[in-house]
Image: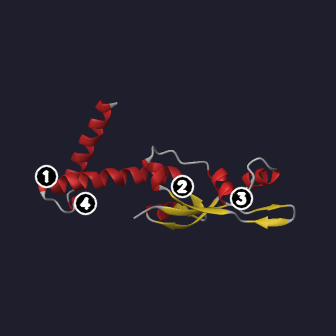
Amino acid sequence: MKNIITASVHFSFKGENHSPSITIELDKYLVAGGNFPDLYPLIAKENNHDLYSYEYEMMQAEEIKFSDAKGMVAEFVSDGLLDLQAFQLAWKKNIIFNQLQTIAKDHMQIEDLQQHPELTEVLLQAFQLGQKYSE
């Protein structure tokens, strides 16, 4: 399942309330190297706000709130705040686990690696060792 979330900023400018938002798929940023984009310019561009204006500065003064989370990211949103570091770590662990699950199924006919915690631990250690020596 894709990890999709809506990021919104609520601010006032010249007596008017604004609530620009953007819905983004987080997986594409994580797959591309794990760098999460600066959301303020993305929200501004998507909602036709000039990046070189006082209006944009007012927007940046407010905190981004997150809502409508779908996928694993929903577990990391609380009171409109996203724990991005925890989500990124869990996302990476999930990718690794899915790859290990495929290996266990292909080579050992194990359908559910979660039913074999000792094997899971051994495979994770082997993966980490491979990472250590590939750097």
Q: Residue at x 24, y 55 (%)?
A: 101
| Residue 114, numbered circle | 4
The answer to whether residue 131 is above or below residue 109 is above
Q: Earlier in the sequence, mark 4 or mark 3?
A: 3
Q: Can residue 43 be seen?
A: yes
Q: Residue at x 50, y 49 (%)?
A: 85
Left or right of residue 132: residue 69: right
Tell me the SS state at disc 1.
helix
Q: Is disc 4 in contact with disc 3, using a CB cutoff of under 8 Å?
A: no
Q: Residue at x 49, y 50 (%)?
A: 29
Q: Amino acid at mark 2?
A: Asp
Instruction: Report the Cα–Cα distance between label 3 and label 1.
Output: 53 Å
Q: Find disc 1 in the rendering and name its residue.
A: 107
Q: Amino acid at mark 1?
A: His
Q: Find disc 2 in the rendering and name its residue.
A: 83
Farthest left residue?
A: 108
Q: Find disc 3 in the rendering and name its residue.
A: 48
Within 10 Å of disc 2 (Cα), the crowding (few <14, some 14-19, many 20+) is few
Q: Earlier in the sequence, mark 3 or mark 1?
A: 3
